[in-house]
Image (spheres, helix red, strand yellow):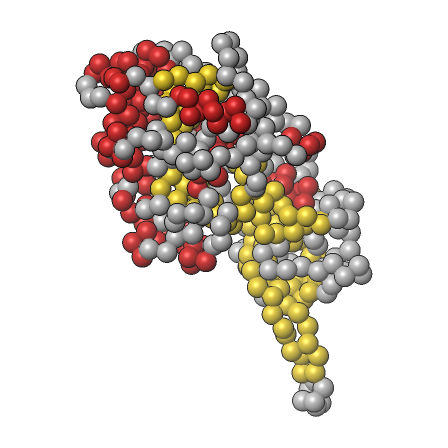
Amino acid sequence: MQNIHINEHLGIVTSDTSTAHFSFFLTPLKDRISVSKNDYVVIDHPVLGEVCPVLAVVKEISNYEKMSVASFEEKSVELMAECDVVGCVDIGGSESRVLRALLFPPNAGSKVYLPYCGFLEDVFSRDLEGKLFANPVFLGSLQTFASTVDGDKRNLRFFLNDCDFVRQHFFVSGVSGVGKTHVAAVVVEELANKAGVPVVVLDSFGEYCGVAVRAEGLGESLKGYPFDFVFSVYSSDPERVRSKLDVLGAKVEPGGRFSVKSVSGDWVGSGKKSVGSVGADVAKSIGGGVTVFDAEGLSFEEKRVFFANSVLSLLESRVKGLVEPFFLVVDDAETVGDDVLRRVVFEGRRLGVSVCLLTCSPGELGDAVLSQMGTQVLGRTTGCWDLECVRNMALEKVSDLPRLAVGEFIVNGVTLRRPTKVLVRDRYSAKIEAHG
């Protein structure tokens, strides 16, 4: 239990409890550590006791005035915290720790404790069967602070299950400039470095050339990110791409980790010849690394044809078994034709292709496509129609969407327990600005 929570209790549960909510009178700890809105707390299970901690999140903190019966002039003010129950975790033996629903209301008078961040991150880095993520994808941090066993306080880190990226589709939305491409680049870094998942990127503006190059000045924090995966770029202007990589210190040479190839005229044409031309070449490069289709400099219509040919070719290659399953990042969903987009979304999973769609306008994708997105990463959204389209994704957090800052996203999905506000971490790879 010493690794679960701070020994000194933070408060006492009041008499009004349920399986979903409880309140407690809050008293700061001796070292002035207290609790804030959105922080987590733990109490003992009403039946199983301390071997099954009940986890809850503080939804509101308010002043509670106590009046003396003898005189209205005598009063005291106490802090009361209102909490929503998240679930309970049985830590009594099994390595699989499932976060289950609480079926009995907490006991009045139960002591409330501050959990350690290590315990919280352990709980939230497990799948629905209670097993730890094999290669947790580190997306960013929460607003919530928690104490370490050493007594320090830090933000809780937020992880996604790497297995989800090969089992379902992902969706990233938000107005221009909120960091959608940044989110996708972070995901690509994680999958390529830690999980070995092949990634294909449809890059409209040449912003992904740096994802295979380690950023400078990050030191020991990148021990788990070797940046040794194969990186291939197909571009209509290969010299421009080579120049970018050269500035970043990446060597493009025969047999090396980096390769840049020219897009032939067939790639931006129509018909089966174009699709076949793409497939014959690209099938050789996909496998455990990152492959980028760079469309910078092409017109919108040229991009649409280029990306459509690329996607159709990759799907045909999967049917023929020429390429292994991969994760497809579509940086600008609008640059892929509606028919092709619907096909890769509806047929992709059967063929081992998971898709990550990025868009400024969720409403333009349609309900059919949006309904297939297993995990959603929602940035600042202000349009009435767009808000309505993502309402069932953000749930109770939908009112937060118009107020989100750059880099802040609401993350939800079929394998997540509740919508969660996340500040996406900095990139570990070199960043290239659009048209840079």
Quick check: can you spot residue 416? Answer: yes
Q: Image quadrant for the C terminus? A: top left
In the rendered view, tell whether residue 348 sits above or below residue 324.
below
Question: How many circles with numbers are drawn on the protein?
Answer: 0
Question: x and y percent of residue 305 in the render?
Answer: 25, 27
Question: x and y percent of residue 291 in the render?
Answer: 43, 22
Q: Is residue 33 left or right of residue 263?
A: right
Nearer to the camera, 404 or 305: 305
Nearer to the camera, 27 or 272: 272
Quadrant housing residue 51: top right
Question: x and y percent of residue 250 in the render?
Answer: 54, 22
Nearer to the camera, 355 or 76: 355
Q: Is residue 265 left or right of residue 166?
A: left
Quick check: can you spot residue 108? Answer: no
Quadrant housing residue 30: bottom right
Q: Residue at x 21, y 16 (%)?
A: 272
Quadrant housing residue 193: top right
Q: Is residue 233 left or right of residue 43?
A: left
Check the image and name the residue furthest to the top.
255
In the rendered view, tell whether residue 27 sits above or below residue 367.
below
In the rendered view, tell whether residue 414 sits above or below residue 389.
above
Q: Residue at x 41, y 41 (%)?
A: 172
In the rendered view, tell whether residue 394 sits above or below residue 164.
below
Q: Image quadrant for the N terminus? A: top right
Question: x and y percent of residue 105 in the render?
Answer: 58, 56
Check the image and name the residue furthest to the left.
271
Q: Residue at x 59, y 52 (%)?
A: 143
Q: Residue at x 71, y 60 (%)?
A: 34
